[in-house]
Amino acid sequence: MTIVLLTALGVGGATIIGALLGLIFKNISHKFSDIVLAFASGIMLAAAVLGLILPSLEHGGKYGILITLGGIFAGAICLNLMDKFIPHMHNADLEVDHEEATRRKVMLFVLAIAIHNLPEGIAAGVGFGTGDHTQALMIAGGIALQNIPEGMIVIGPMLACGIDKKKAFFFAFLTGVVEIIGTLLGYFAVSIATAVLPFALAFAGGTMLYVVSDEMIPETHSHGHERGATYALLIGFGIMLVADTLLG
């Protein structure tokens, strides 16, 4: 339990670290942000497949493939419905209308980050349900790495629309807390009912695949640095593949 709690704090804390960096370095280049985010995308893709989806198949028994496919699509559809019914803005929407951004728009943007942090946290927590702490920590590490540039991104728009530094950091801090809660929820869910483990693993994998495809890759390919971002994604994926082979 101690390692799960520390992981939850690490995953959520990464967003907070990113927010602090955003306060210190206000003008982070898109190129740097895109490369880091793409690298994290590669890690998350590998973590979703190797750490969540394949273990789901292994624990699913006779109907493993059906459970896994159902979980993947359930996770993706869940995030899709959240996107549809909870009003918010994506990063690109905010940047296009940056000069006219109101506090309401910015807070909807921050809400969007918080919405997606919950299932990411759940994915980190569910990973511990397999009993393979090394794999679970790799999944959490990928999510945490992605959270650093995300925390940096959250701060900028709030400062730009006149929210003072303390309040901006507080709101960014809350998005990190959401991820801590999600990690603990995911861990306790599979601990209480191990029968749901295969579905929960696939569900978490589906949410991660959705986030990478719907949010992270489009963001890294929207500022003219898509070639570098693509190779950064492949490097991240390759590192996770090597780590899984050596530590597996």
Image (tube, rainbow, N blue to C red):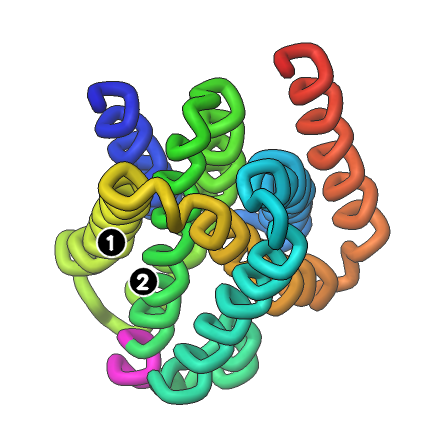
Q: CA gap, disc 1 to disc 2? A: 6 Å
**What is the number of callouts on the image?**
2
Are there few (<14), some (14-19), or many (20+) residues within 10 Å of tag 1? many
Is residue 20 something one can see in this rendering?
no
Answer left or right for 218 relative to 91.
right
Location of residue 185 with respect to 89 vertically, above or below: above
Q: Main secondary structure of the magenta part?
A: helix
Where is residue 240? Give x, y as percent: 67, 28
Is residue 100 something one can see in this rendering?
yes
Where is residue 226? Give x, y as percent: 80, 56
Are there few (<14), some (14-19), or many (20+) residues within 10 Å of tag 2? many
Where is residue 223? Give x, y as percent: 71, 64
For the residue marked with disc 1, what is the amino acid? Answer: Val
For the residue marked with disc 2, what is the amino acid? Answer: Ala
- In the image, which residues are magenta? 102-107
Answer left or right for 77 relative to 110.
right
Viewer-closest of 146 and 141:
141
Question: What residue did someone put label 2 on?
Answer: 114
**Residue depicted at x 40% and y 62%:** 116
Question: What residue did someone put label 1 on?
Answer: 178
In this view, which residue lies farthest toward the right? 227
